[in-house]
Amino acid sequence: MERKIMNDFLRWKKDINRKPLLLYGNRQIGKTYSVLAFGEKEYKTVAYINCENNYELLSIAKRENSVEKIVLRLALLVGEPILKKDTLIVFDNINDLDIVKMVKLFGKGECDYHVIMITSLKENLVKFKGEELQYKYMFPVDFEEYLKACNQNQLIDFIKDSYKNNKPIPFHQIAMDHFQNYLMTGGLPEAIEASFHNPNFAYLNSVHQKMIDCYKRSLLFMPTLIDTTRANEVLDIMPYQFLKPNHKFQYGLMREGSRSKDYEAAIDFLSNNNFVYRCYKVSNVGMPLSKFKDKDSFKLYPNDTGILFYQLHLNQIKLLQDDKLKNILYETSIANNIVSSGYNLYYYASEGKAEVSFIVQSRLGKIVPIELVNTNLSKAKSLTLFMNKYDIHEAIRVSEENFSLKKGIKYIPIYATFCFKEYL
């Protein structure tokens, strides 16, 4: 499966100021696969080293402080020569600080050894931070990558062109059909491959359940001391927070008598490590948006629509017929694309209960409201009220309808939100 991050790897390789790269992202999203595929394509050899319980590697890290001696020991460890410029050295599942300190030696001065480290914990950035490293976050498969896996490159070009020029796309229903399938599988490569080769829903469900179990098991081995029981409760109850009229996260749904302080640490950890995405409420708007966020009012979004589809016990018929459940998945998909485009999540809610789904502070410094259109007409009015109140002249309205532009509002179909990264 072709991933966009391959282009980032290539830019890193060609960077004259290249440092060892720390690649981080959630489990099971294809980090290792992508790095190894890049290595096989761009280098003569790949020296792959799994750091989990690798005591021989740990011994090298603690004893050696010379790059050349380290390379000689690593070559013995992997059983083949490590060549300057021609070998990609890969340290997978890296969590030990001594090993990171060793890798940082490759980032001091001029060094012709190319090194990539892989970890699943975003918080390791704090622990591993240093000028000797470069960093890259990897997200799950987005809809553009999914379409490429479906051999729909021409459809991608049509979508991007329509997004830029606000003109209807002639293959709108085809794109919608592909997107409905993507919502059900989500962005985990194993789930996507399962849907391609075995369209049986029971099998796809088993893949998603395995992913949930993997997330929960990983919480047991986190270096940060958190209450794993409460973290798991948050993951379990999160989908059902969306079944309320108000999607704001409510601690009272966790267990009777629960309070914010009981779950704050668990939610902070899940959010900081992108197990979930936190969307803060703003009731006023200005620059920067972070200044106006209400830390006590937020929504939590899953990082994958496929897992949410499974947790809500949906099937294809339910998805097509139940607008409420469909909008939950649509809203989650938009949130995922906003985050992967490099933006923080905010939603607007006033005392009069006018609400706008998402508010983005764009790279050009503009405040851009993004509204998901559903059967709730009051929301449609909310966007207009918001634009008038804050003198906003540009907005995005997302729905199942085709592309258009009306009175400063850009109408885009739900499948086109992957374009945010390039054009927002």
Image (spheres, rainbow, N blue to C red):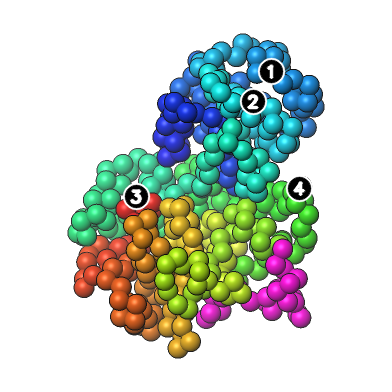
Tell me the amino acid under the disc marked 1: Ser
- Asked if residue 410 lies left or right of residue 108, the reply is left
Name of the residue lying farthest toward the front: 109
What's the magenta bit mostly, secondary-structure-wise? loop
> Spatial distance from mark 4 to mark 3, Cα to Cα?
36 Å
Name of the residue lying farthest toward the bottom: 352
Per the image, the residue denoted by label 2 is 105
Please report the residue visible at 61 percent of the width from the left and 38 percent of the height from the top.
130
Secondary element at image label 2:
helix
Name of the residue lying farthest toward the top: 81
Please report the residue visible at 44 percent of the width from the left and 36 percent of the height from the top.
8
Tell me the amino acid under the disc marked 3: Glu
> Spatial distance from mark 1 to mark 3, Cα to Cα?
42 Å
Tell me which segment is drawn in magenta: 243-265
Q: Quadrant of residue 272?
A: bottom right
Tell me the amino acid under the disc marked 4: Pro
Per the image, the residue denoted by label 1 is 66
Q: Nearer the viewer, mark 1 or mark 4?
A: 1
Per the image, the residue denoted by label 4 is 223
Compare marks 4 and 2 and give the one earlier in the sequence.
Answer: 2
The disc at residue 422 is 3
Q: Kindly check if marks 2 and 1 are in contact, taking CB atoms under 8 A apart as contact.
A: yes
Sort mark 2 into few (<14), some (14-19) or many (20+) by Cα contacts within 10 Å. Answer: some
Q: Is residue 93 above or below residue 382?
A: above
Q: Quadrant of residue 108?
A: top right
Compare marks 2 and 3 and give the one earlier in the sequence.
Answer: 2
Please report the residue visible at 72 percent of the width from the left and 21 percent of the height from the top.
65
